Image (spheres, rainbow, N blue to C red):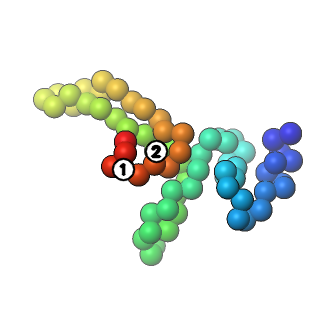
Amino acid sequence: MFYQQVLAQQPKDKNKIYSLHEPDVYVIAKGKDHKQYEYGNKVSIVSTKDNNIIVGVVSHDKNIHDSKT
């Protein structure tokens, strides 16, 4: 079951569950002193040049580098 996976996970485990309500979120390392980590999903948004109308959105499953989005 889902909660058993949360209880059994260890600090060094990969693919940990960080939220019971949003199991698809992951840790994003920011590398800043005041805020080293954030939790969530990374998204890419495409908008038009002139009007800033959003024409596309993609939610990424993993924390990929910005140069790859």
Instruction: Give me the residue at 79% from left, 57% from top.
Output: 9
Residue 7 horizontal side relative to residue 20, left or right: right
Q: Which residue is mark 1?
A: 66
Q: Is residue 4 left or right of residue 67?
A: right
Which quadrant, please, contains the N terminus? top right
Q: Position of residue 65 (x, y in %)?
A: 41, 52
| For residue 47, above or below residue 10 | above
Name the element at disc 1: helix
Could you tell me the amino acid type at mark 2? Lys
Residue with the most extreme top position: 55
Whether residue 18 sits left or right of residue 42 in the image: it is right
Per the image, label 2 sits on a secondary structure element best described as loop
Residue 25: image location, x then y, percent:
59, 46
- Tell whether label 2 touches label 1 (CB within 8 Å): no
State the residue at coordinates (81%, 48%): 5
- For marks 1 and 2 on the same chain, the one whose residue lies earlier in the sequence: 2
| Residue lying farthest to the left in this orientation | 50
Residue at 44% x, 69% y is: 31
Q: Quadrant of residue 51?
A: top left
Which mark, residue 42? 2
Q: Nearer the viewer, residue 40 or 64?
A: 64
Q: Quadrant of the C terminus?
A: top left
Q: Tell me the residue at 16%/31% (across/down).
A: 49
Q: For the residue marked with disc 1, what is the amino acid? A: Asp
| For residue 23, above or below residue 27 | above
- Label drawn at residue 53: none
Q: How far across and how far down the image is residue 67, in percent?
A: 33, 49
